[in-house]
Amino acid sequence: MLNRELLEQQISELPLYIYAFIDPSSLEFTERIRYICHQECPMFGKTWACPPAVGSVEECKARCLQYPECLMISTITEVNDISDIEETLSTRSDHEALTTQVQEFMQQQGIDPFVLSTEACTICPRCAYLDGQPCRHPEKMHPCVESHGINIIPTLEEQGIEFQYGENVVTWVSLLFFHENNGKT
């Protein structure tokens, strides 16, 4: 059983901008977000963490909604020039490290969350997906929130978080879906 008080104590010591327990059924799943992945992301079709490998939006929604609980964590980072995609993406690794820490806090309590974060997954130099092979590190891979068709902006707004703070502020978000009384389904 999850000790939320302990978890909140642990995560309150991390440099998170915000964390909140949310109802997974309140998330907005939409093909519109997947369309953006397909049209604009160079990783589409290249990793196990991205569409189409993650499944259809309906399959992703069903996977997420099998969990009755979700912990959302968010970090913000200032960059010199948000239009510099290399600089912006270089700040992602700090958020991913925090996501992994929170995942480990939950695992220490016997909870194995299903984690969505900011990755297109770059753990391996060449993803096994391209060779028709299974993921080499499924326990480390965190598919991107958007890869599952989740429009996170309404959820952020419900939590009183502005997605755009200013020209050069990057907002990173992770979702950790879980069952409070046991591990992963």
Image (cartoon, rainbow, N blue to C red):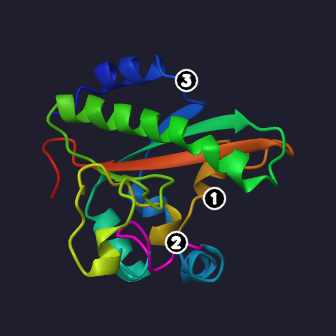
- The kind of secondary structure the magenta stretch mainly shows is loop
Q: Position of residue 67 (x, y in %)?
A: 27, 57
Q: Residue drawn at (46%, 16%), measured in percent from left and top?
A: 13
Query: What is the CA distance from the residue labelled 3 to the residue labelled 2?
Result: 29 Å
Query: What is the CA distance from the residue labelled 1 to the residue labelled 2?
Result: 25 Å
Query: Which quadrant of the view contains residue 132?
Result: bottom left
> What residue is disc 1 on?
154
Q: Where is residue 101 in the image (x, y as percent from the top left)?
A: 36, 31
> What residue is disc 3 on?
15
Q: Position of residue 110 (x, y in %)?
A: 14, 35
Q: Does the magenta stretch include residue 33?
A: no
Q: Is residue 62 visible?
A: yes
Q: Left or right: 34 with respect to 184?
A: right
Inspect the image, locate mark 1, and give the three-letter code of the amino acid beneath it: Pro
Query: What is the CA distance from the residue labelled 1 to the residue labelled 3?
Result: 23 Å
Q: Which of marks 3 and 2 is nearer the N terminus?
A: 3
Q: Residue 27 carries which label?
A: none
Q: Residue 43 carries which label?
A: 2
Inspect the image, locate mark 2, and give the three-letter code of the amino acid beneath it: Met
